[in-house]
Image (cartoon, grey):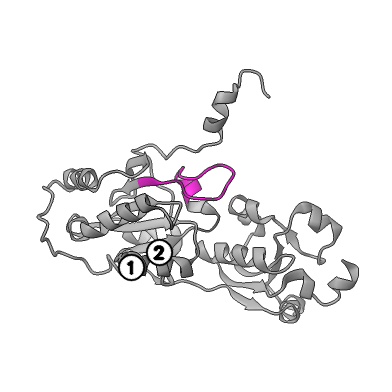
């Protein structure tokens, strides 16, 4: 252990802190539970953004908090504010959860908790969102950043002060076009067979790159010639090494990890992203060599 570091300090070293107020917020680009692509830059200049990061879909405290936001949704809208829940669960589970809780605001899929990490709302090692509340003003500046769930009354008071007004009455029905249904359809990550993937890569004028998301040890043991190795858990920090955000084929041992990689890439705006069904196990000739 490095000199000067005590055992009691380790949990703090492994924990990220939410970004400080007054700083410019990182760009958010995630897929909502219904398939729309949500980008924070689309709201710059005309709407405030409330981000609620949460970790579990089986937690009464989270359920109650999201429902409390839903109960006051017209007040938030009257204060020019759009609400988004952010978590690491996939869209199909978020659709079910949103319907079960009766929420009108969108829940965003944050694969590998990349967005949470950028906002300081994730652990350094495990990819999950820690319960946190982040409030951005119309110019994309962080005006509130806190671990845990802040009471809705405090949020409304903060927003009212920001907007130079008072908290609206409970029967406020003022809404704005696009607050509850913002964004355009997100690009999808499609599955292809190994034979189709090989054909795409073999084309003489192909722009596709093959991304292998297995561990370095697995990659060293055997890999497809020309493949780029970026392990799945390192992808959020290294995807720039691909040098492109289009025409990418993702590959793993059996197709599960590469599916998550493809979903992550599409969530940050990549297009023409494909996942190889059944992975390396189905690649022509690979089974004889591996």
Quarter location, residue 273: bottom right
Circle number at residue 182? 1
Please indicate whether residue 160 sits to the left or right of residue 86 in the image: left
Question: Is label 1 in contact with label 2 (beta carbons under 8 Å)?
Answer: yes
Mark seen at residue 38: 2
Q: Main secondary structure of the magenta part?
A: loop
Position of 27 with respect to 272 (left or right) is left
Q: Which residues are magenta?
A: 116-133
Residue 220 in sight from this viewpoint: yes
Residue 212 occupies quadrant: bottom right
Q: Residue at x 13, y 65 (%)?
A: 173
Q: Compute the Cα span from label 1 to label 2.
A: 7 Å
Q: Is residue 79 left or right of residue 245?
A: left
**Residue lying at the far top of the rendered structure:** 4
Say whether residue 84 is magenta: no
Q: Quadrant of the N terminus?
A: top right
The mark tally for this picture is: 2
Residue ID at (39%, 72%): 184
In what quadrant of the picture does the C terminus appear?
A: bottom right
Q: Secondary structure at mark 1?
A: loop
Mark 2 is surrounded, within 10 Å at the Cα level, by few (under 14), some (14 to 19) or many (20 or more) other residues, namely: many
Front residue of 90/45: it is 90
| Image coordinates for residue 207, horizontal then vertical, percent | 68, 72
Residue 47 seen in this snapshot: no
Residue at point 82%, 77% (across, down): 284
- Observer-nearest residue: 89 or 120? 89
Give the secondary structure at mark 2. strand
- 239 over 281 or under it: above or below: above
Q: Position of residue 238 (x, y in %)?
A: 63, 52
What residue sits 74% from the left and 75% below the top? Answer: 201
Q: Residues within 10 Å of mark 1 (few under 14, many from 20)?
A: some
């Amino acid at each position: 252990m490095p000199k000067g570091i005590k055992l009691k300090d380790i949990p703090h070293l492994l924990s990220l802190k939410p970004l400080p107020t007054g700083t410019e917020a990182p760009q958010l680009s995630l897929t909502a539970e219904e398939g729309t692509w949500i980008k924070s830059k689309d709201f710059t200049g005309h709407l405030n953004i409330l981000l609620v990061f949460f970790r579990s879909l089986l937690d009464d405290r989270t359920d109650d908090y999201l429902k409390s936001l839903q109960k006051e949704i017209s007040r938030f809208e009257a204060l020019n504010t759009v609400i988004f829940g952010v978590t690491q669960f996939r869209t199909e589970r978020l659709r079910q959860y949103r319907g079960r809780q009766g929420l009108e605001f969108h829940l965003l899929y944050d694969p590998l908790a990349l967005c949470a990490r950028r906002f300081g709302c994730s652990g350094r090692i495990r990819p999950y969102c820690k319960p946190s509340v982040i409030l951005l003003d119309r110019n994309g500046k962080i005006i509130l950043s806190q671990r845990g769930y802040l009471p809705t009354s405090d949020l409304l008071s903060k927003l009212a002060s920001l907007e130079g007004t008072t908290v609206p009455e409970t029967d406020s029905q003022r809404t704005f076009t696009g607050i509850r249904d913002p964004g355009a359809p997100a690009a999808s990550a499609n599955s292809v067979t190994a034979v189709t993937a090989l054909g795409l890569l073999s084309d003489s004028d192909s722009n596709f790159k093959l991304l292998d998301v297995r561990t370095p040890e697995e990659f060293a043991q055997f890999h497809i010639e020309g493949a780029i190795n970026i392990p799945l858990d390192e992808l959020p920090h290294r995807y720039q090494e691909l040098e492109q955000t289009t025409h990418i084929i993702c590959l793993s041992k059996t197709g599960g990890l590469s599916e998550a990689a493809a979903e992550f890439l599409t969530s940050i705006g990549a297009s023409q992203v494909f996942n190889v069904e059944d992975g390396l196990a189905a690649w022509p000739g690979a089974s004889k060599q591996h």
